[in-house]
Image (tube, helix red, strand yellow):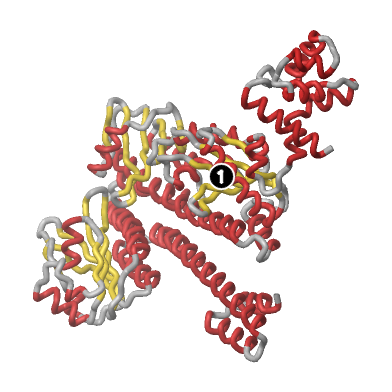
C-alpha cells in the first residue's frame, strides 16, 4: 500500500509518466522480488490513472473550446475579425503549424485564400485554387473533409504547378481540410497543416468539422450584420434573435427554453424532435415528426412547407440530429424562413453540446462499472467515492441485473435501460444494471416495450459494497443463462425465483431457504394449528399419490386425507400437484427431512 500511496501523491502533484517510473525504479531497487513486483503493479496502475485523467481532460478541453469559440465568435461583428479568430482557434486547439481559410467565389469557380495564421510564404498566402484542384478544391467541390499525411505524394488529388509550388514554399507536408457549409452550400474551406508528416485522427477531423460548422454560422452572421449596418432591418432582427438563441444555449438553457424563444419570435408553435423522432420540447400543438418533409429539408438544407406546417432539419454537417416543426404559420416571409433556419442551427449546437456531455458522462459511468466488476477489492473505498460523485451510493444495497436481447445492439439496450437503474453500462459484452429496488421481471417487460423485442433479465442481490456486488454480478450471469436455457426469454428473475434450478446454480446452495420458500405456508400452518399437513404431504408422495395407501399409512379416514390435501392446495396454490410443482415440493420435503 505504501507504493500506491507514494505514487498517487506524486500523481496528485502533477507528475508525468517519467517521474512516476523514476520513483518506482528508485524505490524498487534492492527490494525483495515480491516488494519490487508491488512497485511495478502500483506504477502500472498510476500510469493508467494518469492516462485516464489526460483523456478526460482532453475531452473536457475540446468541449470547453467549442463553447469558448462559439462565445467569442458570437461577440464579434467585423467579418475580418471573425475569420482571423477562426484560424487562430484552429491553430491553437489542434496544435498545428499553419491554419488557414479559403472562401469560394461562386461566380469565378475558384476558392481563394482569405486568411492565414502561422504562414511565412507570400506565395502561399496569395494562392487561389480552381474548384476540384488540390485538396482544398476537392473539399470545396464535394463538401466532404479530406486529410493527407503527405500531400505532395498523395495521388488522390489533382496537383497543379501553382498549388504544389506554394505548398513547397510554405514547407507543408500534412494537410487536412473541412468544408464550411451553409445548408448544402459550401462557402469555403477550413484547413490545418503541419510541416512534418502527421496522420490526423478521426477525432481531430471531427473536431475541426465542429469548428467549421461554428465558423460557417459565424461568417454568415458577420456578413449579415454588415448588411444591417446598411439599414437592412429584417436581417438585423434575424441576427439579434440568433444572438439571443446562441446566448441562451451558452448559458445552459434546456430544449424547452430554446423552443419557447423560437416560438415567441416566430409567433407560432414549435415542436422539437431528436433524430429518432422522440419529442424533446413542445410549445403549442404536438405534431409527429413528418418523415418526408424532414428528408426534403435535410436534402435541401432549407426549411420546407408541408400543408400548414413548416419543417427544418437540425443538422451537424450531413448528420441529422433532429427536426424543428413550426405550427400555426401557414406561410413564412423570407425573413422568418431565414430566422427559422437559424433557429435550427442553434438547436444543432445545443444538441451537440448535450451529446458531448452525455457521452463523457456515459464513459465515466462505464469505467466505474468496469472497475467495480473486475477489481472490486483493489480499492473499495475509492470505488464508493467515485460512485458518490455520480450520484450512486455503492455502500447501500443494490441489486445487479444483466439484460440480454437478440437482434438489438448492446448500446441501444443500455440506452433504453438508463432510466431503469442507478448505474448502467456495458461490461464483458453484457448490459449491466445496478438498482436499489429493481424488480427483474418488471425491468424485462419495460425494456421489451422500449426496444420492441423480448429482453431477458437475470438478477442477483441485493448486495452491499464493491466485493459483494461483483459476486452478485456473477450470480446474475448464471441466472440469465438459466432463464435462456429454460426458454424463458422476455422474462426476468433471480436464482431464488427459479426454484430448485436456482438452488443448483447458486454459489452457496441455500437449501434451507429453498425449503422455506417452497413449503413456508404449510410449515407455518402446522406450527400454528398443531396439524400434520407436512407429514400428510410426505406420505402422499411416498405412496405414489394414492389416497387409499396414504390413509392406511396415516391410519385416518380417506376423507381426512382429502380434506388435508384441500387445505394444502389452499396454502400452496391449486397447481401444487402439477408435475413441475410436485417435483419442487418433493425436493423441499427431502431437504426438510435431511436438515432436521
What is the crowding at mark 1: few (fewer than 14 residues within 10 Å), some, or many (at least 20)? many
Q: Quadrant of residue 311?
A: top left
Q: Residue at x 39, y 31 (%)?
A: 268
| Count of marks placed on residues | 1
Image height of 359 relative to 10, above or below: above
Give percent across and percent down for residue 382: 67, 63
User: Residue 67, relative to residue 334: is it above or below?
Assistant: below
Residue 264 versus residue 179 in the image, above or below: above
Does residue 269 appear anywhere in the picture? yes
Residue under pointer 1:
402
Question: Quadrant location of the N terminus?
Answer: bottom right
- Judge left or right: residue 240 versus residue 459: left
Residue 577 locus on image (x, y percent): 67, 20
Q: What percent of the width, then of the height, locates residue 92?
A: 39, 72
**Closer to the camera, 537 or 28?**
537
Relative to residue 406, is residue 384 drawn left or right? right
Q: Quadrant of residue 582?
A: top right
Element type where label 1 sits in the image: strand
Write the residue at 11% across / 67% down.
158
Front residue of 497 and 120? 497
Q: Which part of the image, by quadrant, shows the C terminus?
A: top right
Asked whether residue 419 appears in the rendered view, the answer is: no
| Left or right of 276 in this view: 517 | right
Q: Residue furthest bottom?
A: 30
Residue depicted at 27% across the width and 70% down the height: 100
Residue 115, by quadrant, is bottom left
Q: Is 580 placed above or below 47 here?
A: above
Q: Position of residue 200 (x, y in %)?
A: 32, 69
Q: Residue at x 70, y 54 (%)?
A: 465
Amino acid at each position: 500500500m505504501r507504493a500506491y500511496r507514494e505514487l498517487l501523491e506524486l500523481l496528485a502533484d502533477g507528475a508525468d509518466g517519467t517521474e512516476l517510473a523514476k520513483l518506482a525504479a528508485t524505490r524498487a531497487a534492492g527490494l525483495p522480488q515480491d516488494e519490487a513486483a508491488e512497485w511495478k503493479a502500483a506504477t502500472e496502475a498510476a500510469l493508467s490513472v494518469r492516462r485516464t485523467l489526460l483523456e478526460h481532460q482532453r475531452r473536457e478541453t475540446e468541449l470547453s473550446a467549442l463553447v469558448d469559440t462559439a462565445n467569442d465568435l458570437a461577440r464579434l461583428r467585423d467579418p475580418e475579425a471573425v475569420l482571423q479568430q477562426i484560424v487562430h482557434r484552429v491553430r491553437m486547439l489542434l496544435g498545428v503549424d499553419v491554419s488557414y481559410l479559403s472562401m469560394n467565389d461562386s461566380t469565378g469557380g475558384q476558392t481563394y485564400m482569405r486568411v492565414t495564421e502561422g504562414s511565412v510564404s507570400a506565395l502561399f498566402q496569395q494562392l487561389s485554387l480552381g474548384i476540384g484542384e488540390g485538396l482544398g478544391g476537392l473539399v470545396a467541390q464535394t463538401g466532404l473533409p479530406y486529410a493527407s499525411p503527405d500531400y505532395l505524394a498523395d495521388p488522390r488529388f489533382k496537383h497543379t504547378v501553382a498549388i504544389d509550388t506554394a505548398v513547397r514554399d510554405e514547407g507543408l507536408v500534412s494537410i487536412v481540410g473541412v468544408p464550411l457549409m451553409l445548408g448544402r452550400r459550401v462557402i469555403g474551406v477550413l484547413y490545418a497543416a503541419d510541416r512534418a508528416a502527421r496522420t490526423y485522427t478521426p477525432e481531430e477531423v471531427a473536431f475541426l468539422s465542429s469548428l467549421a460548422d461554428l465558423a460557417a454560422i459565424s461568417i454568415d452572421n458577420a456578413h449579415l450584420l454588415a448588411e444591417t449596418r446598411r439599414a437592412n432591418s429584417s436581417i438585423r432582427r434575424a441576427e439579434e434573435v440568433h444572438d439571443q438563441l446562441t446566448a441562451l444555449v451558452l448559458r445552459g438553457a434546456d430544449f424547452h427554453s430554446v423552443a419557447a424563444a423560437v416560438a415567441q419570435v416566430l409567433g407560432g408553435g414549435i415542436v422539437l424532435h431528436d433524430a429518432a423522432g422522440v419529442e424533446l420540447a413542445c410549445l403549442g400543438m404536438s405534431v409527429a415528426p413528418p418523415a418526408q418533409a424532414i428528408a426534403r429539408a435535410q436534402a435541401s438544407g432549407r426549411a420546407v412547407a408541408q400543408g400548414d406546417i413548416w419543417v427544418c432539419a437540425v443538422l451537424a454537417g450531413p448528420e441529422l440530429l433532429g427536426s424543428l416543426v413550426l405550427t400555426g404559420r401557414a406561410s413564412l416571409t423570407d425573413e422568418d424562413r431565414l430566422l427559422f433556419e437559424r433557429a435550427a442551427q442553434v438547436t444543432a449546437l445545443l444538441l451537440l453540446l448535450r451529446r458531448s456531455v452525455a457521452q463523457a458522462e456515459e464513459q465515466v459511468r462505464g469505467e466505474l462499472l468496469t472497475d467495480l466488476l473486475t477489481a472490486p477489492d483493489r480499492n473499495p473505498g475509492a470505488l464508493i467515492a467515485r460512485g458518490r460523485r455520480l450520484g450512486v451510493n455503492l455502500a447501500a444495497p443494490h441489486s445487479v441485473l444483466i439484460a440480454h436481447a437478440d437482434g438489438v445492439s448492446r448500446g441501444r439496450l443500455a440506452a433504453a435501460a438508463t432510466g431503469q437503474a442507478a448505474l448502467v453500462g456495458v461490461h464483458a459484452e453484457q448490459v449491466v444494471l445496478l438498482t436499489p429496488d429493481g424488480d427483474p421481471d418488471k425491468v424485462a417487460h419495460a425494456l421489451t416495450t422500449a426496444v420492441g423485442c423480448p429482453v431477458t433479465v437475470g438478477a442477483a442481490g441485493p448486495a452491499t459494497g464493491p466485493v459483494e456486488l461483483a459476486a452478485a454480478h456473477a450470480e446474475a450471469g448464471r441466472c440469465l443463462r438459466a432463464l435462456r436455457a429454460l426458454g424463458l426469454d422476455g422474462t426476468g428473475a433471480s436464482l431464488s425465483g427459479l426454484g430448485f434450478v436456482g438452488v443448483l446454480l447458486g454459489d452457496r446452495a441455500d437449501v434451507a431457504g429453498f425449503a422455506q420458500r417452497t413449503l413456508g405456508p404449510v410449515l407455518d400452518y402446522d406450527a400454528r394449528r398443531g396439524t400434520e399437513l407436512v407429514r400428510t404431504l410426505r406420505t402422499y408422495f411416498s405412496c405414489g399419490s394414492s389416497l387409499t395407501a396414504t390413509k392406511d399409512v396415516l391410519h385416518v379416514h380417506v376423507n381426512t386425507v382429502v380434506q388435508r390435501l384441500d387445505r394444502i392446495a389452499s396454502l400452496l396454490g391449486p397447481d401444487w400437484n402439477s408435475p413441475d410443482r410436485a417435483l419442487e415440493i418433493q425436493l423441499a420435503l427431502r431437504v426438510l427431512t435431511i436438515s432436521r
